[in-house]
């Protein structure tokens, strides 16, 4: 059997946030973990600075997204503040040719995989359902149906097996998704076929307003062994532990041993989306307690203790973050809507006579409007 | 040409598609050593191996969702749903993922998945084994939906479905699996009529009778019976129910002026409703009578001993024909609301 964080069935609650593996504690102190340690032996201060920079940039994207939504520029935003550690740490463990299947909240995964500024906002603005070509950054379109992507990752991994390569597919989903049939079926398929897939369950404690205790009475990582999948329960606010655990999981899958499962215990500091009001369903004290576990602050403290957090570094990262934030804003504000007739594009790969007729009729209808600078069909009807 | 059952024709279609393209793989419950509960995949495991004939866990959403991932990776999965009524657990993956990923990614991700569904009733099966869910899929943009009625179409249209870069829901009437017909196994896909074209199964001049799947045979019987009464019925086998070949349909309706649609599925918001709405839009001035639907009732599929009362048979179709011809019929004297 491979590395496995010890689970204690006597531990009565999925909310036990201390029963986790970690490498950096809440005070930013490096702590030992014999299981995780060896996976990050190469991570020096420079590499740690890189992780800090990634997380800071991701937080800046998130901050900008919320601001743009509040200003009416985006229809919705799904904040990721508090989850930068698990997102950046796990995504930095990938090889470029591995393939990730994220949910809608994995801003950090998209960022690490190479998403461009517009990719974070255009869908939430309502211009597209997705922006980047998944094959350009080996990352699937963010999934909105809860847990559906877990099966896609397993299927993709089955394709990897048939192609005889050593890539790995990974699925990201939340604690709420762990209740979905798709996620459980994904684990059955992954285990039965020994598919090279990694499941990353981001347990951020809340599925909109439902606490994790509604989904689970026992740590979610404890389910995977029941499917024959080794699992690890880590501190998701520890970017180093996230990197180490993902390296373990990817190595396990890549070396032909089948799937692996990570439960990253973390916290969503903001609302589920900008549409809900978390003050209705959770206490301020709880949020403040998690604020003290901030994934970025603890890496800053660790870097300071290593004399690796100088003013120059800090200022450079802040400047990079501001530049990225500005680019995200510019992408949102500069977005140009497609021509109306474009809504018919790409429904099918091959011509479909029924849709072709509708398109033709709509084009004729649009042609009855006076053209404007914004394009044909957007003006007043003649 | 070879005489084959529809089951064997589909088996040959799968074999040929897999031989032509090594990215084609077949997935489903019991399709390996058993050859499927209808033996449609008989012999394929030995020929192509377990990497391409994939016996799956018993989980329809799992089968469909992993097929999506395989398609993401460049494969062309052919999924066998064991029975029509078992497709519902896979419904979310079909309508939210399979149907939409191409649109969502602006064409970057293709979903060339064929969903084979042994379909509809008339075989005395248990509950959930005789359903006609086609309208759900016809209503979903991004899916092509076809229903075959004879071994030749089953063979060639299956190969066309697998070769298509679009997802295709492929309905196979269970009650025709053992019916025989001529099949041209050497048929070239390029020469075959496109999957979306309807077929005039029988020419006629008085009434256009539209149908698909196993109901084509019943419609043909009805047309033969009607001939004895001097009524000439044109039977159209739609073959594709999304898209519908309205060029063929409207040409017929403009000729006959009268329309009857028959299908096994329930009537409300069914394929017949869509057909008649579209025909009315396109051919209103040619219609001599209000179109008529002869369908399954709006009830859950009844127990096997009673299914004959649910399935539109020859007499019910002829009753519908009498209605469009304003001849005495079952509704004569009734005041319809």
Image (cartoon, coloured by chain):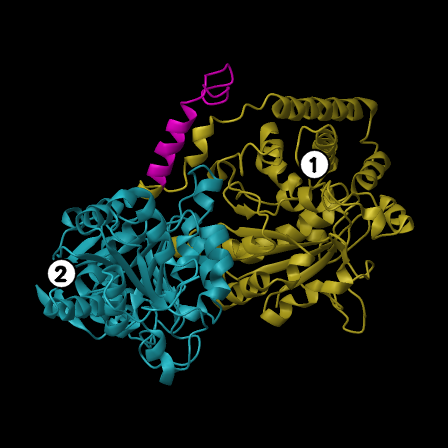
Chain colours: A yellow, B cyan
Q: In this view, does A99 lie to the left or right of A78?
A: left
Q: Position of residue B189 (x, y in %)?
A: 18, 50
* Disc 1 + disc 2, Cβ < 8 Å: no
User: How many numbered marks, from 0 up?
Assistant: 2
Residue position for label 1: A47
Of all residues, the one furthest to the bottom in this rendering is B305
Q: In which quarter of the image is residue B53?
A: bottom left
As helix, strand or loop, the secondary structure at mark 2 comes to loop
Left or right? Give the position of A38 relative to A338: right
Residue at the (77%, 63%) spot, across then down: A213
x and y percentages locating residue A370 in the rendered image: 45, 17
Q: Which mark is residue B232?
A: 2
Quick one: A231 or A365, which is closer to the camera? A365
Q: In the displayed structure, would residue B303 be above or below residue A216?
A: below
Q: Nearer the viewer, residue A231 or A81?
A: A81
- Camera-side mark, 1 or 2: 2
Q: What stretch is highlighted in magenta?
A: A355-382
Residue A182 on image: x %, y % = 56, 61
- Kindly indicate the quadrant of the structure image that contains residue B70: bottom left
Residue B22 visible: no
The N terminus of chain A lies in which quarter of the figure?
bottom right
Q: What element carries label 1?
A: helix
Q: Is residue B100 visible?
A: yes
The answer to whether residue B330 is above or below residue A355 is below
Q: How crowded is mark 2: few (under 14 residues within 10 Å), some or many (20 or more)?
A: many
């Amino acid at each position: 059997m491979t590395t496995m964080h010890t689970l204690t069935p006597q531990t009565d609650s999925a909310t036990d946030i201390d029963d986790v593996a970690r490498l950096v504690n809440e005070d930013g102190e490096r702590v030992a973990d014999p299981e995780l340690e060896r996976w990050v032996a190469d991570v020096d201060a420079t590499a740690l600075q890189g992780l800090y920079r990634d997380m800071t940039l991701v937080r800046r994207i998130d901050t900008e997204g919320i601001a743009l939504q509040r200003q009416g520029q985006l229809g919705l935003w799904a904040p990721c503040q508090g989850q930068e550690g698990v997102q950046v740490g796990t995504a930095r463990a990938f090889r470029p040719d591995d393939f990730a299947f994220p949910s809608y909240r994995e801003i950090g995964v998209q960022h690490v995989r190479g998403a461009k500024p517009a990719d974070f906002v255009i869908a939430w603005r309502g211009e597209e359902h997705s922006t980047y070509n998944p094959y350009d950054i080996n990352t699937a379109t963010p999934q909105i149906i809860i847990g559906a992507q877990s099966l896609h990752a397993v299927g993709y991994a089955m394709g990897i097996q048939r192609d005889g390569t050593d890539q790995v597919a990974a699925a990201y989903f939340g604690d709420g998704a762990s209740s979905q049939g798709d996620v459980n079926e994904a684990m059955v398929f992954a285990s039965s076929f020994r598919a090279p897939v990694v499941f990353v369950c981001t347990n951020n404690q809340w599925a909109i307003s439902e606490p994790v205790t509604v989904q689970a009475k026992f740590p979610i990582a404890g389910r995977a062994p029941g499917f024959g999948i080794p699992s690890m329960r880590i501190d998701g606010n520890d970017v180093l532990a996230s990197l180490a655990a993902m390296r373990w999981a990817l190595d396990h899958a890549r070396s032909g041993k089948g799937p692996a499962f990570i439960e990253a215990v973390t916290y969503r500091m903001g609302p589920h989306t900008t549409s809900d009001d978390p003050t209705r369903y959770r206490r301020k004290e709880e949020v403040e307690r998690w604020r003290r576990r901030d994934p970025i602050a603890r890496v800053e403290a660790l870097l300071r203790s290593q004399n690796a957090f100088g003013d120059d570094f800090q200022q450079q990262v802040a400047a990079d973050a501001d530049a990225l934030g500005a680019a995200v804003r510019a992408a949102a504000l500069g977005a140009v809507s497609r021509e109306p007739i474009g809504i018919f594009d790409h429904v099918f790969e091959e011509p479909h006579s029924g849709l072709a007729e509708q398109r033709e009729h709509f084009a004729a209808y649009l042609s009855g409007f006076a053209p404007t600078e914004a394009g044909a069909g957007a003006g007043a009807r003649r | 040409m070879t005489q084959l059952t529809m089951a064997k024709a589909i088996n040959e279609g799968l074999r040929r598609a897999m031989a032509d393209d090594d990215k084609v793989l077949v997935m489903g419950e019991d399709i390996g050593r058993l050859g499927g509960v209808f033996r449609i995949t008989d012999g394929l495991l030995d020929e192509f191996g377990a990497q391409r004939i994939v016996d799956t866990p018993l989980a329809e959403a799992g089968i469909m969702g992993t097929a999506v991932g395989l398609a993401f990776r460049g494969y062309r999965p052919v999924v066998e749903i064991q029975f029509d009524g078992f497709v519902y657990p896979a419904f979310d993956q079909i309508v939210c993922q399979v149907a939409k990923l191409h649109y969502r990614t602006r064409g970057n991700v293709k979903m060339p998945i064929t969903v084979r569904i042994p379909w509809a009733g008339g075989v005395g099966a248990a509950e959930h084994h005789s359903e006609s869910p086609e309208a759900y899929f016809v209503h979903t943009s991004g899916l092509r939906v076809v229903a075959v009625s004879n071994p030749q179409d089953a063979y060639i249209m299956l190969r066309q479905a697998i070769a298509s870069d679009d997802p295709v829901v492929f309905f196979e009437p269970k009650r025709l699996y053992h019916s025989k017909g001529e099949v041209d196994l050497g048929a070239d896909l390029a020469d075959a009529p496109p999957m979306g074209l309807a077929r005039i199964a029988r020419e006629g001049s008085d009434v256009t009778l539209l149908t698909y799947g196993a109901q084509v045979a019943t419609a043909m019987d009805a047309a033969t019976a009607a001939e004895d009464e001097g009524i000439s019925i044109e039977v159209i086998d739609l073959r594709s129910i999304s898209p519908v070949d309205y060029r063929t349909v409207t040409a017929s309706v403009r000729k006959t002026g009268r329309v009857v649609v028959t299908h096994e599925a329930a009537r409300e918001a069914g394929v017949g409703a869509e057909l008649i709405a579209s025909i009315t839009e396109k051919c209103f001035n040619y219609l001599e009578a209000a179109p008529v639907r002869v369908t399954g009732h709006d009830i859950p599929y009844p127990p096997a001993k009673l299914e004959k009362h649910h399935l539109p048979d020859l007499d019910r179709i002829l009753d519908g024909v009498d209605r469009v011809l304003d001849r005495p019929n079952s509704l004569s004297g009734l005041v319809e609301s």
